[in-house]
Image (cartoon, rainbow, N blue to C red):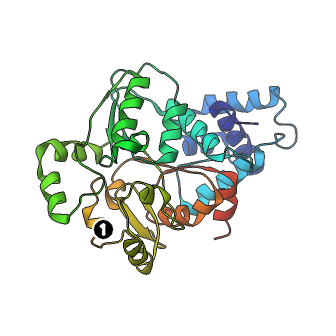
Amino acid sequence: MRLTEDRRKMLKVATLYYDHGLTQSEIAKKMGISRPIISKMLQQAKELGMVEIYIKDESSHSVKLALAIEESFNLNEVVVVAGTGTHLKKNVARAAASYLVGQLKPQQKIGLSWGTTMAEFIEEVPYVHHPDTMILPLAGGVASQDVKYDANHLSFLLSEKLSGECAYIYAPALAETKDLKEVLVASKMVSDVLNQGRQVDLAFIGVGQPASLTTWENLGYIEADEFTHLQKQGMVGDAVASFFNQKGEALDNDFTRRMIGVTLDELKQIPNVVLLAAGQQKAESVHAILKSAAIRTLIIDQTIAEKLLTL
């Protein structure tokens, strides 16, 4: 069963109240919801048959995993998509879309990174009227043949779905040389959008894993010798405009100095950075980036969640 956002929250409230022994006031403070709503959700959980003497729902395991990860990594919110079968990325994308809709506020700035998971996420977002929303790319553009993964393109698509506005970074995600990057980011057209991206209220990003760096390779951005050098530096993943090691520290080398976008360290200044990941192979990368303290919300599948708690 795929959890809706309301049902997931109801399960979380029930788990915190009945299994963890928190008071309604403590749950209200933890989740940022008023106490009367918490009380109402507990009553609804009983009426729906989710709660008897114990929590009765096939997805309660994923909620318990989420709570354990929240506590282990000091996160504001964790959503674990139940199940271990096929279509993990699609299911994570749907959960992220539901989360986004629940987070929408007036005059909000939302940042987006790029990649296959992000493309799936935007595809799942429903059409919701929020005309005062500004969508900002957090990284430069990618090759035209892969525009569906491009942060500029995804920002446009999301702005269309929200009836909002968007901006573009008129520069590549990876410049040919460090000197060219410095020229591009010094231009007002690029620097203004990058600065806005660093000041968004809410950001959604994906994470790459080191086994193959498939997206970067498919785009023709990384050569075998560069990949080998990154591995020797201890690279375990990438996010937006940074590669990082097992400690969640951004790497500094010729390749990363040519990347154009918001860096891992700059993400730490954004109030709510939401990380999306699917597939157990991403677990090590997710584990590492959580150590950076840049991530506040995590949306993952059950296979990653179970692996995270063993690393």
Please give left or right for residue 190 compared with residue 65 in the image.
left
Above or below, 157 relative to 286: above
Residue displayed at 17% across by 53% down: 185
What type is the residue that disc 1 sits on? Answer: Phe
Query: In the rendered image, which quarter contains the C terminus?
Result: bottom right
Residue 269 visible, this orientation: yes
Report if residue 294 is visible in the image.
Answer: no
Instruction: Work out which quarter of the rendered image holds the N terminus and state it.
Output: top right
Q: Kindly give the residue lying farthest to the bottom in the view shown.
A: 232
**Disc 1 secondary structure class:** loop
Q: Position of residue 266 (x, y in %)?
A: 31, 56
Place residue 177 in its image quadrant.
bottom left
Q: Nearer the viewer, residue 100 or 122?
A: 122
User: On the picture, is 123 further left or further right than 254?
Assistant: right
Image coordinates of residue 12 in percent, x first then y, are: 68, 42
Could you tell me which residue is drawn at 48 percent across and 35 percent down?
122
Q: Which residue is mark 1?
A: 255
Q: Measured from the top left, where is residue 220 in percent x and y?
A: 38, 58
On the rendered structure, is 142 left or right of 99? Answer: left
Examine the rendered structure and indicate whether residue 20 appears above or below residue 228: above
| Left or right: 162 in relation to 253 | right
**x and y percentages locating residue 39 in the rendered image:** 68, 31
Number of other residues with Cα within 10 Å of mark 1, as a class: few under 14, some 14 to 19, many 20 or more: many
